[in-house]
Each structure stands twice: as structure tokens, then as C-alpha cells.
Amino acid sequence: GRRTCSVDLIQHIVLFAMVGVTMKAVKRKIVKKVKKTSSRPRVLNMTVVDAHHHVLQPIWDAVKARQLPSGGVKFVHFDSHPDMGCIGSELEKDSERVARVKSIIPKIYRNSFSATECLALSDISTWIPTLVFQGLVDEVVWICGPWCNQIEVGCHDLIVGRHKKDGMMRIGTPNDQRTPAVDYWAGEDCFAKLEELDMLRSWKLHVYRFSKSGTFRDIHVNKIKQICSRSPWILDVDEDFLSCQNPFSVEFRQMFGEEDFKILRRVVDGAGLQGASYDTYYKALEQLAQDDAHLLSTGEYNRHESVKAAKAELSKKRKGAATGLMSEFRNLCRKVDQTDGRRLTGTEYSHCDASFVMMAAGLIDLPHHISTLPEMLNILKGTCHLLRSIGKPPGVVTIATSRSDEYTPEAQALTIHSMTIGALEKLWGRKKSLEVRVHRRDCRDGLSVYDRDDQKCLRLFLAKGTKKKGKFCTGVAGTLPP
């Protein structure tokens, strides 16, 4: 019995020794793996697109990759435009696309929707509230140049929801407060009272402007730092924040000259009308353009109901200006209506009707400031100072070139892009704990000049315009596409 007991004891001792060795080996492997994993730098993806709303996709991708959480994210937006219209607000109310918007809005709220469909229904000016409505973002910081005045500087408490009657997205405010900032949404019929909305999500909007010298006040830097340093955040940059043009005004000037643009400006100003009087006046202009009233004789034109309505409003402000302005509007429309061009070319690009006048009129107040290189460098310095002050890198970076829609001046576009990418890579690329990767997803078809790269132009030419090989794309991480 003693012998058997001794054998069993020896076997147990050997077994425990073997287990101990195995456990030590496993522990060493785990420690080694942890050290190896912890030594890997975190990847910071910077995705470049052309149309700004396309940044939605890399943001959603970052959430899927767990580089961002699914809620509580802060959104820092450098741009000359707010881009905060509601999805579908620019569409005709009876269009097929509006029905699709109404269908997808509840799905966005539930955060269970088709990304492809959402992108297809979004626009460069109507995509940021979508991030709030899906529950991803709860605070937006819009940083713009001193030439931007679309939304009042300051902190604004807002609510995004679905309108109970028409099913479209709307913006509201706590207690239905009608602050000056609300005018941005009210002008696009995107503002509503809370009792008219369901599927509500609250959010904060902070608006800050660079000074003319390209700097920020310290109090604003500290506020943005406070917002982002304790929360996951997204950095979003539209390159037109450094220098911006109004492509519609530029096109009108180039087609019809400075003098006619000044006439357009006078007509749009409407002798200083404001509020409901201006709305009535402007709707009368739209109706006149739609009716091609400029083609009528002078007497018939003056008897047109919309001419009478416009004059009635103008007379309330400046009685002597009414006849002159309405005559200038008629003459301008007659000049733009190039019937010879229509007969000669048979194309829509001849701008052969008064709708071109109204398109330029409706967008005449978009920001337009062509910055000098020193101005751009000063703003870029202020930007880097702010980002360094935040300290913590963002979860993802998105950059829009805005070249195909021409908001970024083409003559400056390559310089602006190179400076923007270079500054951000320098800011975070030197950190050992961070690996910056630039992904180029901006591409455009049919352009003969692109980034001064004659090899890309040659490849397009040799591809004979075929869809597969003839597309201009910028490659990945700054490399040329094969």
C-alpha cells in the first residue's frame, strides 16, 4: 500500500510540474502577443472624396471597423458651407425621389438602412443632420472663414426629427425658440415646431469663424478642446474652407459680364425688402421666369399679375424703384434667353431661358472669397494650432476636394489639396503610436486637365474614353493608378 501511494504521489508531482511548465509557456506567449499588439500603431484613416456627402461612407465604415463607437461622437466640420440641410429638402415635392426619402427616414432613425440608398438620396448640402438622426453624432462644430455668415456664431441647441404629416426630416428647437440661427433652415422650409415632429434627437451646434488674420480666440480653442478631448470625434474638412468661390455667380459673370451681374444683384436685393414682403416679391420673379413673361410685349408684361404683385411689394419700400427694377428684370431675361443659341446648338448648355437667371439669383448669396496664398497659410496655421490643442487624434478624417462642383477654385485646387494633406500628415504622421493612411476615393470623368499630371491625361487619351480604363482617378495614398 505504501508503495502504491508513493507511485501515485510521484505521478501527481510530475503532472503538476508539467502543468506548471505549460502554464508558464502559455503565459509567456500571451505576454509576448500583448506586447506585440500594443506596439502596433493605431491606424488613422484619411479618406479623400470629391463630392462632400460621399464622406458618409468612410464614416460608416469607421463605425463598422470599431474605430468609432455607434453613438456620442463629436463632429468637427471645416467648410465654407454648413451642409446642414435636411435630406431631400432640395427635391421637388412630387418627385419619385421624395417618396424614397420618406421611406428611408424611419430606417435612418433606427440605424438600419441602406448606405447606398442614403448616399443616392443625399446632396452636398443635406447630409450632416443624417449623422445626428441615426444616433451617431450628438454635437457638431462648424468652423468657417470670416467670409461666411450663413449661421450665427455661437452655441445652438437643436432637435432633428420627422414631420408627422409629410414624413420628411425637419429641424426644431427646444421650446420652439426662433433664434436667428433658425433662419438657415426656415429658408429651406426645414424648420418645424416640436409638436409637429416625432422620432426626435437632440444635438448641439457650435459655430466658430476664423478671424481675418486666420486665428481663433483662445476661449474658442478651449471650448472645442473641451468638446473633443473627452469624446470620440471625427475631423471633416472641405478644402474650400481655405478659399471658396460661388460657381453660379462665376458662371453668370463669365456668360453675361459684370454689368449684367450687377443688374441681377439689384433685382435680387429687391430694394431692401425683407421678411414676408421679400418672399412675395421673389415668388413673383420665379413665376415670371416660369411663364416666360419676358417674351410678352411691354404692355402685356406690365399687366401680368406677378409683375403687379412684385411692384406692389417694391412700392412699400421704394415706390420709385418698382417700375425700374421690373423693367431691368425683363430686359435681363430677354438677354439671357438666347434663342439663336438654341437653334444653333440644340443643347441645354446654351442657357436659353429665364430659369438660368433664377438659378443664379437663388444662389447669389453663397460665399465667394478667393483667398491669397498668405491668407490660406494663416488659416492653415490656425487650423493646426487648434488640432494640436485638442491633443487626441480623431477616430477618422474625411476630406472633400469640392472640385467637380467648382466650389474650390480650380486654379488653386492642387495647391490647396497638397497643403491640406501635407499639414495633416505632418501633424499626426510623426507620432509613433499612430499610422496615417491616405485613401483617395475622389474621381471624375471627362476632364482633359487634372493635377498637372500629363501621364494621367495620356492614359485617358490612350484608353479612347472607355469607362473602365478612361476614368480619371487619383490613385491610393498619393500613388498613380495603374
Image: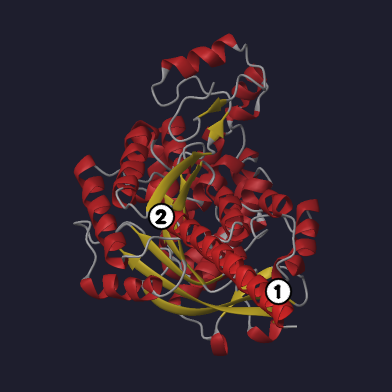
Residue type, label 1: Arg
| Left or right, residue 350 beside residue 369 | right
| Residue 364 is at least partly visible in this image | no
Q: Residue at x 55, y 55 (%)?
A: 125
Quadrant containing the C terminus in the rendered view: top right
Circle 2 residue: 39
Against 148, is 45 above or below? above
Q: Is residue 316 left or right of residue 11?
A: left
Front-most of residues 61 and 359: 61
How many marks on residues? 2
Say which residue appears at 40% left-offset and 75% top-offset: 230
Residue occupied by mark 1: 162
The residue drawn where x is 45% and y is 28% is: 479
SS for dot 2: helix
The residue nearer to you, when weighing 409 against 72, is: 72
How far across and down, in percent of the image, does residue 76 sit?
42, 63
How would you rate the neighbour count of disc 2 (Cα within 10 Å): few for under 14, some for 14-19, many for 20 or more?
Answer: few
Is 256 on the left-hand or right-hand side of 296?
Answer: left
Find residue 366 and report its horizontal and vertical position in percent. 44, 53
Type of residue at label 2? Ser
Residue 9 in view in this figure: yes
Task: Work out whether 196 lies above or below 311.
Answer: below
